[in-house]
């Protein structure tokens, strides 16, 4: 259409007439003022401003919205009409309905906003990168999770090459995987450990290649799902399973020890009681006395076994109380070994306490007593008749006391020493006079010592003897 400077129609085609009737319900006619045909005040205002720009000599285009009810978009091109002398006498208007295009643009914009919202709110890391010649890989965009996980800002990543962002040792593998995705034209998945300022990340990575219409890979889209906690849980489950297997093996070993060590003294009991039941009337007092001594010995062995089993059970269940106090070391050791003197004297073994008077120790009295009894009892058991046992102690670094129990017994080889504190390994053997062994005493000793924050070590040589050294906290008077 064309109009003069009074906004009157000079010319319009049938399409324009139909548009005006559709938009405002009015029929255009030559000489009619276009502003009278446009019934919407807002539309008149925008139309007048666009026409005035053309009347002022400006050729321009703009997008305008027309219609009372159905609002359609038009792309309008305005040009001034000049007479022969150059004076502007009106304007031409070419209008094209672009409502469909605007609706598509709106849907695309809404879709883009939705995708951007999803892109930036998902917990997984998402990034888009360009595949450049070389090949080289350049980050185009990353989501908020990428920045949160890596501790890097959008400005530090977007527009940068991958080698400027991803640190070693992950970089080489990542570039290799990118190349594989491009070459094999498929999604590549793998797990990797990455290190960023925020810490270590174990990620499940997926890389998808994007191709243009010529089949050339132009982009890579990557996602990283954080599986750090999952891996941690898997490790914990694996550790628990391994611990469970170990506990089951220890339980089996425990019951094996229990069955074996209870059988011998009870067999002795049964045999002796059978003899007494069948022959008591014909036995002399000396014979009865010898049987009584044997029964007492068997009872003592059963009692020691049950005492160790009870203590070991309490330790395993964590119900043993721990109440450390300060006490004189030499005096307490003298009390502890008094009940073992008979066994030592029977084997003509001398037990020597080589501890300075006044040396104090800070420990749980009950645990310490059990510890000394077990170590000295072992020394007596594996020392030949006429041997020697020395119990010594010395301060170490002013904070702890090293205590040693040394015997001149039969000693051990290196393999036996290495397995002494392992329940799953059978290190039991009879004493020099066939004294029984449970294998639990040393385990209890180790637990007692570690409960005090100390440690124990063993030095031994076959045929020479053994020394057990352990450390406990010290109290200075």
Image (cartoon, rainbow, N blue to C red):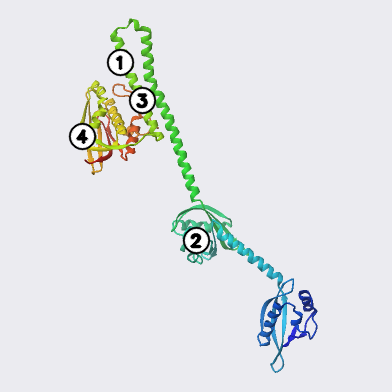
Task: Answer with left or right where residue 430 lies relative to residue 80.
Answer: left
Earlier in the chain: of badge 1 and badge 3, it is 1
What is the C-alpha distance between the residues marked 4 and 2? 65 Å
Q: Which residue is mark 1?
A: 293
Task: Answer with left or right where residue 165 lies relative to residue 9.
Answer: left
Earlier in the chain: of badge 1 and badge 4, it is 1
Question: Who's the residue at 23% across and 43% down the image?
Answer: 398
Q: Where's residue 438, x and y in %?
A: 36, 27
Callout 4: 10 Å neighbours few (<14), some, many (20+)? Answer: some
Above or below 144: residue 358: above
Earlier in the chain: of badge 4 and badge 2, it is 2
What is the C-alpha distance between the residues marked 4 and 3? 30 Å
* The C terminus: image quadrant: top left
Q: Which residue is mark 3?
A: 305
Q: Element under label 3?
A: helix
Question: Who's the residue at 26% across and 22% down the image?
Answer: 343
Residue 147 image label: 2
Q: Where's residue 141, x and y in %?
A: 54, 64
* The N terminus: image quadrant: bottom right
What is the C-alpha distance between the residues marked 3 and 2? 63 Å
Q: Element under label 1?
A: helix
Earlier in the chain: of badge 2 and badge 1, it is 2
| Disc nearest the viewer among 4 and 2 | 4
What is the C-alpha distance between the residues marked 1 and 4? 35 Å
Mark 4–mark 3 contact, CB under 8 Å?
no
Residue sitting at the far top:
282
Mark 1–mark 4 contact, CB under 8 Å?
no
Residue 175 image label: none
What is the C-alpha distance between the residues marked 1 and 3? 18 Å
Earlier in the chain: of badge 4 and badge 3, it is 3
Question: Who's the residue at 44% across and 29% down the image?
Answer: 252
Residue 355 image label: 4
């Amino acid at each position: 259409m064309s109009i003069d400077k009074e906004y009157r129609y000079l010319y319009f085609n049938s399409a324009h007439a139909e548009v005006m009737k559709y938009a405002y319900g009015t029929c255009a006619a030559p000489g009619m003022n276009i502003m009278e045909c446009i019934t919407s005040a807002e539309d008149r205002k925008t139309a007048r401003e666009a026409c005035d720009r053309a009347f002022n000599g400006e050729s321009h285009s703009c997008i305008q919205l027309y219609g009372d009810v159905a609002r359609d978009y038009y792309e309008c091109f305005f040009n001034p009409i000049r007479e022969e002398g150059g004076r502007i006498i009106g304007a031409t208007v070419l209008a094209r309905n672009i409502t469909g295009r605007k609706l598509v643009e709106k849907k695309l914009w809404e879709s883009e906003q939705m995708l951007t919202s999803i892109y930036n709110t998902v917990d997984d890391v998402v990034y888009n990168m360009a595949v450049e010649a070389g090949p080289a890989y350049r980050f185009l965009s990353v989501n908020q999770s990428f920045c949160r996980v890596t501790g890097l800002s959008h400005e530090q990543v977007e527009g940068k090459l991958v080698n400027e962002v991803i640190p070693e040792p992950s970089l080489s593998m990542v570039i290799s995987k990118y190349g594989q995705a491009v070459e094999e034209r498929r999604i590549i998945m793998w797990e990797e450990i990455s290190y960023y300022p925020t810490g270590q990340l174990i990620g499940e990575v997926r890389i998808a290649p994007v191709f243009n219409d010529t089949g050339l890979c132009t982009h890579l889209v990557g996602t990283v799902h954080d599986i750090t906690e999952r891996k941690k849980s898997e490790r914990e489950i694996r550790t628990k399973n391994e611990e469970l297997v170990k506990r089951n093996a220890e339980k089996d070993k425990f019951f094996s020890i229990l069955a074996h060590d209870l059988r011998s003294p009870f067999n002795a009991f049964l045999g002796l009681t059978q003899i007494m039941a069948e022959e008591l009337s014909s036995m002399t007092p000396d014979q009865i006395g010898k049987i009584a001594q044997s029964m007492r010995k068997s009872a003592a062995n059963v009692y020691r076994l049950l005492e160790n089993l009870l203590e070991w059970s309490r330790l395993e269940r964590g119900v043993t109380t721990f109440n450390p106090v300060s006490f004189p070391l030499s005096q307490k050791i003298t009390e502890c070994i008094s009940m073992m003197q008979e066994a030592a004297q029977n084997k003509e073994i001398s037990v020597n306490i080589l501890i300075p008077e006044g040396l104090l120790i800070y420990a749980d009295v009950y645990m310490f007593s059990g510890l000394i009894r077990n170590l000295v009892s072992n020394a007596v058991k594996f020392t030949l008749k006429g041997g020697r046992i020395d119990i010594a102690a010395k301060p170490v670094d002013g904070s702890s006391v090293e205590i040693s129990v040394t015997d001149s017994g039969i000693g051990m080889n290196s393999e036996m020493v290495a397995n002494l504190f392992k329940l799953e390994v059978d290190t039991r053997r009879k004493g020099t006079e066939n004294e029984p062994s449970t294998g639990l005493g040393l385990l209890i000793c180790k637990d007692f010592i570690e409960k005090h924050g100390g440690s124990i070590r063993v030095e031994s040589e076959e045929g020479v003897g053994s020394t057990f050294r352990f450390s406990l906290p010290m109290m200075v008077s």
